[in-house]
């Protein structure tokens, strides 16, 4: 017999997860508005700069902006942001422990 008020656990099925395209993201922006958090994920490809270091510096001076291709926007409550942060931190800790790597900030 379960306790009154005890949580009921129901398994979740992530419908369509296997068919959903996995997209690489290397640029993130988070904004807060009225207690909600908006996470934008994107793909940033740096412009091709070739030649010597001096030539590349000169080419870079001509670049006025770099486009970021937005691939997803997520809205999170504060509670969900805390949950996602803990999930990411836990995954990183497990990965580092399993590979015995020192933590490196990228």
Image (cartoon, helix red, strand yellow):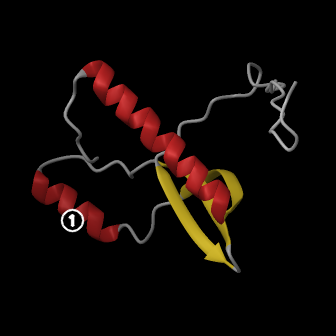
Estimate how packed mark 1 is, as few (under 14), some (14 to 19) or many (20 or more) residues with alpha carbons within 10 Å.
few
Of 105 and 99, nearer the camera is: 99
* Residue located at (38% from left, 28% from top): 94
Q: Position of residue 12 (x, y in %)?
A: 80, 27
Could you tell me which quadrant the N terminus lies in? top right
In the image, is residue 4 above or below residue 33? Answer: above
Residue 39 location, quadrant: bottom right
* Residue located at (18% from left, 47% from top): 51
* Residue located at (45% from left, 47% from top): 45
Of 77 and 2, nearer the camera is: 2
Q: Position of residue 73 (x, y in %)?
A: 69, 56
The answer to whether 37 appears left or right of 20 in the picture is left
Q: In the structure shown, which secondary structural element does the residue marked by tag 1 occupy?
A: helix
Q: Report the number of numbered marks.
A: 1
Of 86 and 69, nearer the camera is: 86
Q: Position of residue 18 (x, y in %)?
A: 74, 19
In the image, is residue 57 above or below residue 89? Answer: below
Q: Position of residue 104 (x, y in %)?
A: 23, 42
* Residue located at (67% from left, 78% from top): 33
The answer to whether 40 appears left or right of 14 in the picture is left
Instruction: Find disc 1 in the rendering and name its residue.
Output: 58
Name, please, the residue furthest toward the bottom.
34
The answer to whether 67 appears left or right of 75 in the picture is left
In the image, is residue 95 above or below residue 53? Answer: above
């Amino acid at each position: 017999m379960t306790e009154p008020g005890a949580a009921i656990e129901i398994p979740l099925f992530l419908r369509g997860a296997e068919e959903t395209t996995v997209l690489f993201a290397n640029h993130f922006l988070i904004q807060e508005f009225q207690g909600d958090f908006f996470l934008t994920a994107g793909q940033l490809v740096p412009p091709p700069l070739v030649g010597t270091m001096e030539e590349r510096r000169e080419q870079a001076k001509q670049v006025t902006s770099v486009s970021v291709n937005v691939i997803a926007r997520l809205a999170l409550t504060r509670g969900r942001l805390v949950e996602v942060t803990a999930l990411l931190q836990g995954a990183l800790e497990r990965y580092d422990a399993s590979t015995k790597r020192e933590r490196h900030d990228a």
